[in-house]
Amino acid sequence: MKSAMEVKELQKVFGKNIAIKHVDFNVKQGEIFGLLGPSGSGKTTMVKILTGELSKTAGDVNVLGMDSSKFKTSDFKSKVGILSDNSTLYKRLSVYDNLKLFCKLYKAPLHHIDDILHDVHLYEERFKTASDLSKGMAQRVLLAKALIHKPDLVFLDEPTSALDPGTMIHIHRALQKLNEVGTTIFLTTHNMEEATELCDRVAFLHKGELQELDSPAALRYKYSDHTFHVETVAGERMVIKNEPETADQVRQLIANRQVKAMHTDNPTLGQIFLKVTGKELV
Amino acid sequence: MNIQRIHAIFEKDIKDFMKNMMLLVLPALPLVIALLYALTSEGEAELPLPLLYLIVGMAFSGITSAMIMTMMAEENEKNTLRGLIQSPASFVDIIVGKSLVTGIITLISLVASLMIVGIEPFLEFRVILGLILLFLFFLLLGIGIGLFSKTVSATSAYLMPVMLLFGFTSMVGTFGFAEDSMAITITDTFPIMQAIKIHDSSSWMPMVVIAIWIIAAAIFTYVCFRNTMTDD
């Protein structure tokens, strides 16, 4: 699979503070890549470097086949959508007029506005003034704004931060729909459930350093204690090691219809992050 | 430069302008002054040029500079400018698009005001060219200050000196300074004073001086815009 993004030995220094320390990673075309880290870990700095809002101190960055010198060109901007943590709407304008502006700036057909408003479940609110929207609605309009031109790659910096679960579900569905048509999504979050649900691969960023990079399932397996927790119909609870020697024991329990419940006890991404970095994902 | 993108920004700004009370009152300022002059100078054949240029200065500083300054500062303060910068619109598309509304409103208000007090002295090619150059100077100055000031409330602090120094320069003569005083010598090089000189001479020097002011304002604007484009 081709890479949508290649980051090699990336470093960013602000004065004496090293914000990004020699980071390497690739994002494949069409995948949802999650960059997880607590506040201040360097996630937003990373997004800003990858979108050309900040210059890098050292290293190589290549996004959609373009190096960082091209990040300010219309060609690059036309292929990328950005929802940053400080994106806002024109408060005096309606939802429709806000999207119409960006539709025209990206030279996208105007019917995209209605399509995207349906996707984020805001079609009925299209003539509402932006200042009258709830925080969740405004965030969905901002997402619509980032996707209005059907970009090849979308950067989403904390897209569901401080949103209610209902809005979060709407946003997740819109992102999954977008990914189904091949759009690459680069997502930063400190919401481990969101990362587990959405991301094909996640990377842990802590104090500017990349600590782990793999699929959520692979990471959970890697850091699990490799045991089964079995509860029998008789009420007995057993912890069985997940290894070839115990396979017969498990098979026997199932054959004898003795199993009431059986599950593995893999850690959550949040627990793994804590184990790897010693810091919680908040 | 892309016409479609310029039009998109213009369309957005005109809608925003119509809903912004703070900006809606600005075009009335030169009209009010023109009406006052017209009422108090009844019977006089023609107002003196410094008075006419007070209206011109009021239009360019009180509408052109103030309006674009407020619009840019609001975009900056509310972080919507970053959205425009992240889009494929170029620096020129954004500046031209945003300037169109300001230009049209200034033009309507200035022409209406001058018609009230007598537009005849301005109906000459060189004078009109001078007015266009003045507009560009005040526009670029406003854009630069709007980007520099970061918040809408901060613009009012910068607008006063702009109005007093560059908008009302033609009134310096009424303060009783000697002809060869430092104040007169310095303000004589200011854009409004140079525009008045266009009426009295056939020299192109006043245009050149105003053009130098425009270049200075353009450099200031470009530096401010470059700083806004990135977080470095």
Image (cartoon, rainbow, N blue to C red):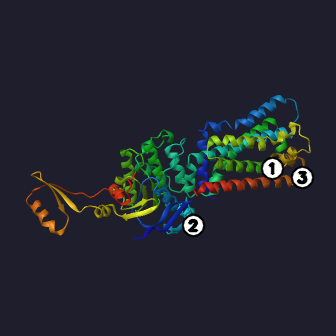
> Mark 2 sits on what residue?
A69
Helix, strand or loop at label 1? It is: helix
Identity of the amino acid at label 3?
Ser
Q: Position of residue B229 (x, y in %)?
A: 60, 56
Q: Secondary structure at mark 3?
A: loop
Subunit of mark 1? B
- Left or right: residue B144 versus residue A188 is right
Looking at marks 1 and 3 on the same chain, the residue that comes earlier in the sequence is marked by 1
Instruction: Give the Cα distance between marks 1 and 2.
Output: 40 Å
Task: Locate the N terminus of chain A and report the quarter of the image it occupies.
Answer: bottom left
Residue A226 visible in the shown view: yes
Residue A48 pos. (x, y %) = 52, 58
Q: Which residue is mark 1?
A: B130
Disc 3: CA contacts within 10 A as few (<14), some (14-19) or many (>=20):
few
* Mark 2 belongs to chain: A
Amino acid type of the residue tagged 2 in the rendering = Ser
